[in-house]
Amino acid sequence: MEIFRIPTDRPPARPRVIALGFFDGMHIGHAALLAAARREGDRLGCETAVFSFSEDSSFKPHAPRLLSEEERLSLMEEQGIDAVFLYDFAAIRDLSPAHFAEEILVRDLSAAAVCCGYNFRFGACAAGDPDCLRTLLAAHRIPLVILQAQCVAGETVSASAIRRALAAGDAEGAARMLGRPYTVRGCVAHGKELGRRIGAPTANLPISRGMVVPAHGVYAALGYLEGEEQPHPGVANIGVRPTVDEDGTPNCETHFLDDVGDIYGRPLAVSLLHRLRGEIRFETIDALRAQIARDASNAKEYIQQWQNGQS
């Protein structure tokens, strides 16, 4: 998959179907939009591309991200996208809808067809909507495919809805909208190693600034180590470790239920399946140790049921 960062890179002039959006989360609605773009690309015999914004742009600066830019691009590649055009939102936010359609989509990106969601807005002050875009593109005989809302349990799927589910600790609800469990990624960092001293070693993943922090608490989880096919069952604590730490930095701390060996510095992805309980401050380390054992038992039972349901 080719990645073009505009205006630094100049994309070659060739016809392409373009899907429009930021695609944070790459949820089931995004997947449906990209699938429609691929079908249109197959029909027209041209490549499928995505118009989006770079991670460091000012697009929705106060909304915590569900995915890093690297994760977002990786999932687009898995969806069969041929090229991605990453724009700086600040550089184009004041363009009129007509300028955006005619100068960027038609002239710069050589659109042969365009796909967008039902709620897509564009142009200065978000003045343009899908009907406006259809009219502007029709002047160039370029078709527009508009995807309708995807719903789960009566709720419209969106990045905002997924953030709300995660903030409420509803890992299952978030997974239904994402099409997969919500996952925290990073390289295993050294912590205070208290878990190792009390017989429950943990893998620490600091949650990067600007990323979504799910509801604090303990989750049944699966850990995926880079280079290994089989996941490791575990108990993940999202929070600030109130019994042993007071610095307030959010962290994903996972105790695995099988032997993973020395994994410091290794890339790890922890998928949150189910919130077992909220975060608790324990008066003693012995009380913490006893609760970890109960959490491990509950997590093991849930993970077995979850895996049986997936098979």
Image (cartoon, rainbow, N blue to C red):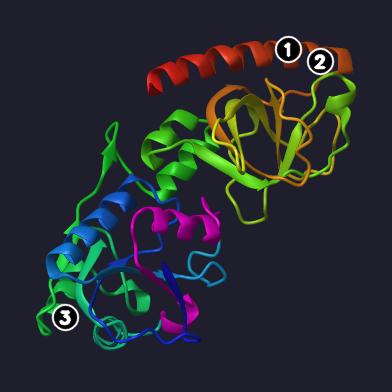
Q: Look at the picture and state if 272 lies above or below 5.
A: above
Name which residue lies at 84% across and 19% down.
Answer: 199
To which quarter of the image does residue 255 belong? top right
> Tag 1 or tag 3, which sits nearer the N-term?
3
Tell me the number on the disc at residue 256: none
Q: Look at the picture and state if 56 lies above or below 153.
A: below
Residue of label 3:
136
Q: Is residue 247 left or right of residue 38?
A: right
Give me the C-alpha separation between circle 3 and circle 1.
62 Å
The answer to if 33 sits in the magenta stretch is: no
For discs 3 and 2, the disc positioned in front in the rendered view? 2
| Residue extent of the magenta highlight | 64-93
Asked if the residues shown at circle 2 and circle 1 are in contact, with their CB atoms under 8 angstroms apart, the answer is yes
Give me the C-alpha separation between circle 2 and circle 1.
7 Å
Residue of label 1:
293
* Residue 110 coordinates in the image, percent (x, y): 25, 83
SS for callout 1: helix
Residue of label 2:
289
In the rendered image, the quadrant that contains the N terminus is bottom left
SS for callout 2: helix
Name the kind of residue labelled 3 in the image.
Leu
* Residue 25 coordinates in the image, percent (x, y): 45, 50
The answer to if 76 sits in the magenta stretch is: yes
> Tag 2 or tag 3, which sits nearer the N-term?
3
In the rendered image, the quadrant that contains the C terminus is top left
